[in-house]
Amino acid sequence: TGLAIDFGLSLGFPKKDVERLYSAAMFHDIGKATIPLAVLDKPGRLDDGERTLIETHPGAGYDILRDNSAISPEVLDGVRHHHEYLDGSGYPDKLCAESISDLVRVLTISDIFAALIEDRRYRPPMPRPEAYNILCGMNGKLEKPLVAAFKDVAFKR
C-alpha cells in the first residue's frame, strides 16, 4: 500500500485518486481469504490446479466487496483487475491496454514490485535493483513510461 501511495503521489494524482488508490491497495488481495492456507503458504512451486485456484482471488475479492456501497467502482476495478496486463495475458478478465484504468496500472506495478522485494515462504526477498529490472523486462505487459516513473519510488522507499 505504501509503495502504491508513494507512486500515486509522485505521479501527481489528485487527492481523491490517491484515496481510491489507497483503498484499492488495502483491499486488492482480500480474495485470498478464500484460498486455503496450504496453497497460500506452500513453500514450493504451485502446481497447475493451485495456480488456477490462486487466480480466482481477484474475482473473489470483487465478489466480497461489490455489494458494499462504501466501496467505489474504481476500488472494485483495482481489486478485480490488479493482475491484468496490457497485452491481455493477465487475469481474471484478460483485459487489454485500453480497458485497464490508470489506477489499476499503478496498482499492478506497485503490487509486482512489492511481491518481489518482500520475504515470501517460497523465496527470499529480492534486492530492489533486481526487482526493478524485472519490471523493466516485462515488455508489453506494463506501461513503460509508468515503469520508468516508478524508478524513484522503487529505490527510495
Image (cartoon, rainbow, N blue to C red):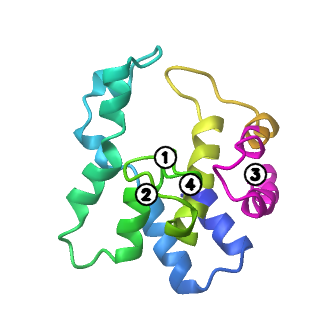
Question: Residue 27: in sight, yes or no?
Answer: no
Question: Residue 30: in sight, yes or no?
Answer: yes
Q: Is residue 52 above or below residue 48?
A: below
Spot occupied by residue 49 in the image (x, y as percentages of width and height): 31, 22
- Residue at the top extreme of this rendering: 44
Q: Judge from the rendering whether residue 25 lies leftward or rightward of residue 102; answer left or right.
A: left
- Magenta extent: 134-157
Is residue 156 part of the magenta span, yes or no? Answer: yes
Name the amino acid type tagged 1. Answer: Gly
Disc with the residue nearer the chain's start (1 vs 2): 2
Q: Judge from the rendering whether residue 97 lies leftward or rightward of residue 27; answer left or right.
A: right
Label 1 close to label 2 by CB (< 8 Å): yes
Mark 3 = which residue? Answer: 154
Neighbour class for label 4 at 10 Å: few (<14), some, many (≥20)? many
Mark 1 = which residue? Answer: 90
Cα distance, mark 1 to mark 3?
23 Å
